[in-house]
Image (cartoon, grey):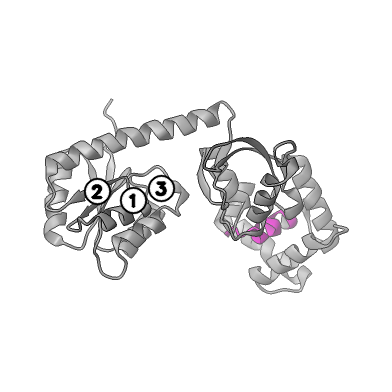
Amino acid sequence: MTQNKPTVLIVDDDINTLSMLNDTLDDAGFTVLVALEGQQALSITQRITPDIILMDAIMPHLDGFETSKRLRENPGLRHTPVIFMTGLSDTENVVDAFDAGVVDYLVKPIRTQELLVRMRTHLRNSQLTTSAYSAMDLVGQTLCVISQEGKLLWATPNAWQLFNTYCVEGFEPQQKFVKRVLGWLNSTDGIKLPLDLSSVNIPLKLYFSHYNASGERLLRIEEIKEHAEDETILRLKNRLGLTHRETEVLLWIARGKTNREIGHILNLSPRTVNKHLEIAFPKLGVDNRTAAAAVVIAALAVKEF
């Protein structure tokens, strides 16, 4: 059986460099994708996850430094190595590149054999890391690490999925629930007692596991299963006068999910999801999903609810 060819995304506005790298990497057994500038690279990586990215530093519109930072905001690219290729060689430029999340830095003109050796090394390291995280999931270890400031540094695949499902505004320090997590960690009870986030409509429970000298905290995550979710749906259904399925759909609308995503979660077609919304909107006295989400959020915020 032949192994799948690794996919490399080259981001460079120099046609000569692209042509040379395309031929070299194609001959070396890679599937090659090309972006001529940073925004195009961001668009491509929303649809396709490359195994490794080669990035020019100086490009029009969006340079390599900013593009690398934005790529790192995509959870699906958290283990994808980014290698800089640039004529910039000052120490300050090198430091800025690593601060932007790159794993290696090559000064042009590119020596192709050296590039291939470095790419294969970083691919092996990335594959080992991905395998280790997946193995933790397989043995039931749903873990994440957050910084002192509340930034999510890494997480196992299942942890990423839970955050993506329930934390629709993202795990960022400015989010209210992240501030709540930090307050819990900095309290006396933070180490002793778990943090239940279901009161803020996030059915997750966090357990403190470990911290290091840099103040980074390792947390174990537990999904609060169906009982709590069913109770929320029942109360919302009774309060808003909806059917059970309409309530489920609207609850996910309030969590920021699209019709396609809701269909996947509830095992419905996007068309069926839309039909439920068409029936539910008049019951709520609204005519769009934003207004419906506001009604659901307001209902969830009522203390007696």
Circles 2 and 1, Cβ within 8 Å, touching? The answer is: yes
Give the residue drawn at x 31%, y 32%: 124
| SS label for mark 1 | helix
Q: Mark 3 points at which residue?
A: 77
Q: Is residue 231 left or right of residue 114?
A: right
Looking at the image, tell me whether mark 3 or mark 2 is earlier in sequence order. 3
Identify which amino acid the numbered label 3 is placed on: Leu
Label the magenta part by its dominant secondary structure. helix
Q: Mark 2 points at which residue?
A: 105
Is residue 303 rendered to the left or right of residue 218?
Answer: right
Q: Position of residue 117 (x, y in %)?
A: 19, 36
- Decide: few, some or many residues near mark 3? Use Cα within 10 Å; few <14, some 14-19, many ≥20: some
Q: Please tell me how crowded label 2 is: few (under 14), some (14-19), or many (20+) other residues with Cα within 10 Å.
A: many
Q: Which residues lie in the magenta part? A: 247-258
In the rendered image, the residue lying farthest to the right is 304
Q: In this view, does 259 lie above or below 220?
A: below
- Screen quadrant of the N terminus: top left
- On the question of residue 133 being in view, the answer is yes
Check contact, mark 3 vs mark 1: CB within 8 A.
no
Q: Which of marks 2 and 1 is nearer the N terminus?
A: 1
- The answer to whether 219 is drawn above or below residue 66 in the figure is above
Give the residue at x 78% y 68%. 283
Q: Residue 218: where, in percent of width, then height?
A: 58, 38
